[in-house]
Image: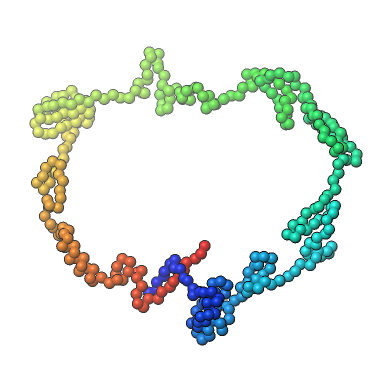
Amino acid sequence: MSKTLSNVKLQLKNGTKANWASINPVLAKGELGLESDTAHFKFGDGVNAWTDLAYAGTIVKASASNGQLLIDGTETVIYTLPTAAISLLGGVKSQAAGSGKVVVGSDGTMSVAEVPKADQLTTARVITASGDISGAVTFDGSTAVTFPLALVATGVTAGTYTKLTVDAKGRVTAGGTLSAGDVPTLTLSKVSDAGTAASKNIGVAAGNVPLLDSTGKLNSSVIPAIAINETYTCDTQAEMLALSANVGDICIRTDGTGTWILKTAGASILANWAELKAPTDVVTSVNGKTGIVVLSTSDMAEGTNLYYTEARATANFNTNFANKTVGGLSDGGNVIMSGDSLVIDCGTVS
């Protein structure tokens, strides 16, 4: 049976470069050894000592000082950019400082030492606003100017209006007062104080609002039927059939024939009465007890299933457990047995 162990930490044989050289062990064939301070590693062959084995690979890292590469711990220049020219894309060469010159600092940043600036336009210009606003100003850059602007009038007389006409630019082009024709037709849902009855039709159908007639009364179709049930006590059948009873009335017979209900109009006909049956399987006692009965094992004799005792449980447990094997337990499938092959799953870093 194959077993898999999850979340196992696998620690390789390791040590500093100096310790490996000092001890100089012979690693088994395929055994891995790691230099913890250089990140170099070797695979053993079962014959040669550590110092006679070659590293399994070359370690290449970026230098922390000048951007070059460290190959097996030695800084190595891979490529040097040439100086840039008109037809050559390369490194940037610093020029002497001066007006309009770009200077490259020792840290590689570039800056312009000085850029000439204009204080005034050679020819002054007139800036004019047109369209919905008007105004003009002359500007030559020598000083700040104020630009006065004015809205172009639309022709509407100043005042307060209840109806406006607005053009595509949002300007008011006309004004007036509302007329009855300006008020749109509203649905009842837009009226907040009409009440719920305003949305109902009048009539006697479901969902309608009923109206009173000329005498101030409701239509009889909207008034539910009212039934008044009576309960009678009779000594004989003849006395029951002589009652002026209505459907639903009850008659309790004292002659031992039970309780009856009139199911159909016509109290003088026995077939129109129905007897109310009482249950015949009433429990009168439980194990000789009456009232609210609470039973325990002491109140009942043992049957096929025996009651629990410490002696019985201990004897059965010892016998049954002694016959069990490790593999037969609930988690026996997780037990590593002789003959099993073991797979160590070191997990996944994600």
Any part of residue 68 in sight: yes
Q: Residue furthest bottom?
A: 47
Color style of the picture: rainbow
Foreground: 192 or 55?
55
Instruction: Please determine whether, in this image, residue 64 is positioned above or below residue 195.
Output: below
Instruction: Please determine whether, in this image, residue 159 is positioned above or below residue 285.
Output: above
Foreground: 326 or 250?
326
At 84% from the left and 62% from the top, the residue drawn is: 86
The image position of residue 261, as x and y in percent, is 19, 31
Instruction: Please determine whether, in this image, residue 250 is positioned above or below residue 69.
Output: above
At 17% from the left and 60% from the top, the residue drawn is: 310
Q: Is residue 133 left or right of residue 166?
A: right
Foreground: 248 or 142?
142
At 44% from the left and 66% from the top, the residue drawn is: 7
Q: Is residue 326 left or right of residue 99?
A: left
Q: Is residue 85 left or right of residue 303?
A: right
The quadrant where residue 120 appears: top right
The quadrant where residue 330 appears: bottom left
The quadrant of the image that shows the N terminus is bottom left
